[in-house]
Image (cartoon, helix red, strand yellow):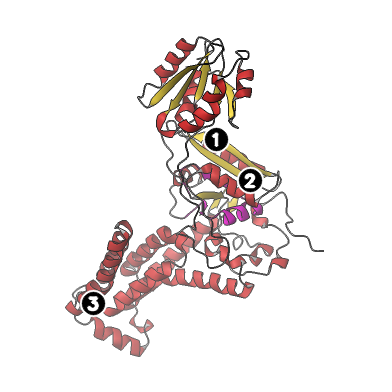
């Protein structure tokens, strides 16, 4: 539906589309008698800016009643014209006032949106001792500015889309033209355009639609809250996705090895970075398999324990009323409940709850003979190991439970079979044409220089071949 040019009729038509009580109108007349009406959403429009940049200049307006001439008098840096009433209503709901005036079949959209944002701070989920401390926030414009500040190149492209029938959420697709694979960019844009859902409150909603296996247990889309990591991934040839209202950015294609790397690895010597990456991998393996092997050894293969350790364990579990599997599941259940409660409760109550759970409940359970000391130690060590790779906690905690159930049912053979199944799945998994387990499967020799092993910067002349970047060289030696 187009604007008619009759002010009163156009205002009524716009109010018919937007009947809510917080959609307000402000009528005023210029010195020459030209009538104007500003239509705006009261809670999300900066009325002070509206008055300074729109109303005040037009009160003294004595020029021609044309959109071009009126627009020249406005002091707002963001302004454009539109004739479709539906699009104008969308702008009003986004916080941008619409200026209508008598005799013109065009309206002026003015960018005086009121922005409520928190300060840029270090994300709590990705703390670094060395390196940048900035983190993304919930405003997409500020997030894109953080990216622009780090990548001052015309090759950086940021394409905006609206996703969500009712939310009309801004989604930014960020990539380096000539570096990122254009087919990947096009595929991501196409998938975003095909999303038909009411609302997109967070970037996690998009991962389901972007993943090639939406119901997979394992991750298929990378995530980060730090602009420096986001820009580094884009520079390697990935495509980044920002969602308005979410501080978590997405990157694709995703490689499993990414979650064993940290931004701090690039600010410390290569040998230290290699050590910490291998340590994270070993911690994760121990966290997943230690409880399962403990149960399997008790039930099926006691000879797996050294004789002195076996005697100690036998003394600890002698009077326990539960089977090893049920005992371990009980301790794991209590740990998960304490973990969830400490996260959801207020901060100070959560700290007290952790102390009660760790000291009082644990000590009392052992003294009462409900659980053994080795079971608590193993589950506690396993829980700490999972947090060595925080981006994989959701997936690895489920894998740990699966291994526990398999070990209690079949023993070590079940653990081996389950591991083989997981490896088979990882080897065959891919997203946007890139294998998730690369550069190990398939083996890409040069990409191993920045995988679990970290070479010095001078050895990383080319971008990861796994990502199939069009611009392969990133470092030139003198």
Which image quarter: residue 464? bottom right
Q: Mark 1 points at which residue?
A: 161
Give the CA distance from mark 1 to mark 2.
Answer: 14 Å
Task: From the top left corner, tell me how far across and down residue 329 is, in percent.
Answer: 28, 67
The answer to whether the residue labelled 2 contacts the one labelled 3, judged by CB atoms less than 8 Å apart, is no
Q: What element carries label 1?
A: strand
Task: From the top left corner, tell me how far across and down residue 336 is, in percent.
Answer: 31, 63
The answer to whether the residue labelled 1 contacts the one labelled 2, judged by CB atoms less than 8 Å apart, is no
Task: From the top left corner, tell me how far across and down residue 41 is, in percent.
Answer: 42, 28
> What mark, if any, has residue 363 been given in the picture?
3
Q: What element carries label 2?
A: strand
211 or 72, nearer to the observer: 72
- Residue shown at 51%/73% (left/top)? 279
Give the CA distance from mark 1 to mark 3.
Answer: 55 Å
Task: From the top left corner, tell me how far across and down residue 74 is, in percent.
Answer: 59, 26
Q: Is mark 3 on a helix, strand or loop?
A: helix
Vertical comparison of 398 with 210: above or below = below
Q: Can residue 83 be seen in this view?
A: yes
Q: Name the residue under label 2.
A: 175
Earlier residue among tags 2 and 3 = 2
Q: Can residue 110 be seen in this view?
A: no
Which image quarter: residue 132? bottom right
């Amino acid at each position: 539906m187009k604007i008619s040019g009759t002010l009163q009729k156009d205002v009524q038509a716009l109010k018919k589309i937007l009947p809510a009580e917080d959609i307000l109108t402000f009528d005023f007349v210029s010195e020459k008698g030209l009538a104007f009406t500003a239509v705006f959403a009261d809670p999300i429009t900066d009325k002070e800016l509206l008055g300074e940049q729109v109303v005040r200049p037009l009160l003294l307006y004595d020029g021609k009643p044309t959109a071009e001439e009126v627009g020249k008098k406005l002091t707002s840096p963001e302004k454009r014209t539109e004739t479709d009433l539906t699009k104008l209503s969308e702008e009003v709901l986004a916080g941008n006032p619409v200026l209508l005036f008598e005799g013109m079949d065009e309206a002026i959209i003015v960018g005086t949106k009121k922005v409520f944002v928190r300060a840029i701070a270090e994300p709590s989920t990705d703390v670094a001792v060395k390196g940048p401390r900035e983190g993304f926030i919930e405003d997409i414009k500020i997030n894109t500015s953080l990216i622009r500040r780090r990548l001052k190149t015309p090759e950086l492209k940021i394409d905006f889309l609206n996703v969500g029938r009712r939310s009309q959420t801004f989604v930014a697709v960020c990539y380096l033209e000539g570096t990122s694979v254009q087919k990947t960019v096009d595929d991501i844009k196409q998938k975003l355009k095909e999303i038909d859902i009411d609302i997109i409150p967070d970037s996690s909603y998009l991962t389901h639609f972007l993943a090639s296996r939406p119901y997979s247990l394992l991750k298929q889309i990378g995530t980060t809250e730090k602009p420096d990591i986001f820009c580094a991934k884009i520079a390697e040839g990935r495509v980044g996705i920002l969602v308005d209202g979410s501080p978590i950015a997405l990157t694709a294609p995703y490689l499993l090895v990414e979650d064993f790397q940290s931004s701090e690895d690039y600010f410390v010597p290569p040998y230290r970075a290699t050590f910490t990456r291998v340590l994270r991998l070993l911690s994760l393996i121990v966290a997943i398999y230690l409880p399962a092997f403990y149960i399997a050894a008790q039930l099926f293969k006691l000879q797996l324990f050294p004789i002195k350790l076996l005697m100690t364990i036998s003394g600890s579990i002698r009077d326990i009323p539960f089977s090893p599997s049920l005992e371990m599941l009980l301790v794991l259940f209590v740990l998960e409940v304490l973990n969830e409660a400490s996260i959801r409760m207020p901060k100070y109550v959560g700290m007290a709850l952790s102390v009660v759970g760790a000291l009082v409940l644990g000590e009392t359970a052992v003294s009462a003979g409900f659980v053994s000391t080795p079971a608590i130690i193993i589950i506690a060590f396993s829980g700490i190991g999972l947090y060595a790779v925080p981006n994989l906690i959701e997936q690895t905690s489920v894998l740990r439970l699966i291994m526990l159930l398999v070990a209690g049912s079949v023993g070590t053979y079940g653990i081996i079979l389950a591991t083989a199944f997981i490896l088979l799945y990882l080897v065959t998994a891919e997203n946007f044409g890139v294998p998730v387990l690369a550069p190990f499967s398939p083996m890409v020799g040069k990409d191993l220089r920045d995988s679990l092993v970290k070479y010095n910067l001078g050895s990383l002349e080319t971008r990861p071949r796994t990502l199939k970047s069009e611009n392969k060289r990133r470092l030139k030696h003198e």
